[in-house]
Amino acid sequence: MLAEAYLFLAKARYLKSVPFERLASSLGESFQESLEHPEGMDRKELARISQSVKIMSKYTFWESQCMVQALAAMKMIERRGMSSTIYFGTARDDHGEMIAHAWLRSGPYYITGAEGMERFTVVGKFAKNAGGKQHGEKYTSESI
């Protein structure tokens, strides 16, 4: 699974350089969220994906921060037939500069980017296998 994570991190890093308008069409249904308790969710498999992406992101020679990690994990989850939602948020840092963050949720679990996500205002989200709660509703989920 580590090799798979490395390959998807490489692909995700490339996708980060693609204009967002082109990338968005591959992310899922815009401004929708996947189910919080979908059938077929495998918590152990989600934990392995989360750990693999976090570990391998430390060993890439390219930048593999939040967006790259979220995109890689999303594709790994999709390959296993599970749903997910990727979130994009913005905030201001301590110096007033605009910063961005991305994180990924599958079922009730945050797979990547859970650290500090509460500081960010969601400006975009995309669901694979959408059909769950709608825009604006909050989840009481946990990080894996």
Image: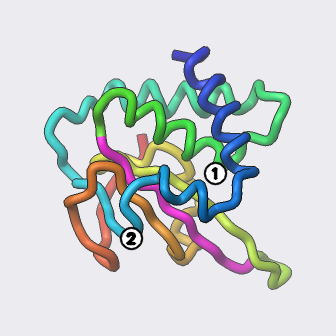
Q: Nearer the viewer, mark 2 or mark 1?
A: 2
Q: Is residue 19 above or below residue 70?
A: below
Which mark identifies residue 67?
Answer: 1
Q: Is residue 110 above or below residue 62?
A: below
Query: What's the residue at 53%, 59% (across, down)?
Result: 24
Secondary structure, mark 1, is helix
Give the camera-side residue of 31 and 53.
31
Residue 128: x, y in percent?
35, 50
Image check: 21 left or right of 30?
A: right
Residue placed under numbered mark 2 in the picture: 31
Look at the image and give the residue range highlighted in magenta: 83-92
Residue 58: x, y in percent?
74, 30
Image check: 117 left or right of 31?
A: right
Q: Is residue 144 above or below residue 26?
A: above
Query: What's the residue at 70%, 50% (across, down)?
Result: 16
Discs 2, 1 touching: Cβ within 8 Å:
no
Image check: 83 left or right of 112?
A: left
Which kind of residue does numbered mark 2 sit on? Phe
Q: Is residue 111 magenta?
A: no
Q: Earlier in the sequence, mark 2 or mark 1?
A: 2
- State how the image is colored: rainbow
Residue 98: x, y in percent?
76, 78
State the residue lying farthest toward the left: 39
Which kind of residue does numbered mark 1 sit on? Met
The image quadrant of residue 127 is bottom left
Magenta stretch mostly in which secondary structure? Answer: strand
Q: Is residue 66 above or below residue 118?
A: above
Give the camera-side residue of 115 and 89.
89
Secondary structure, mark 2, is loop
Q: Considering the image in quadrants, where does the C terminus appear?
A: top left
Q: Is residue 87 magenta?
A: yes
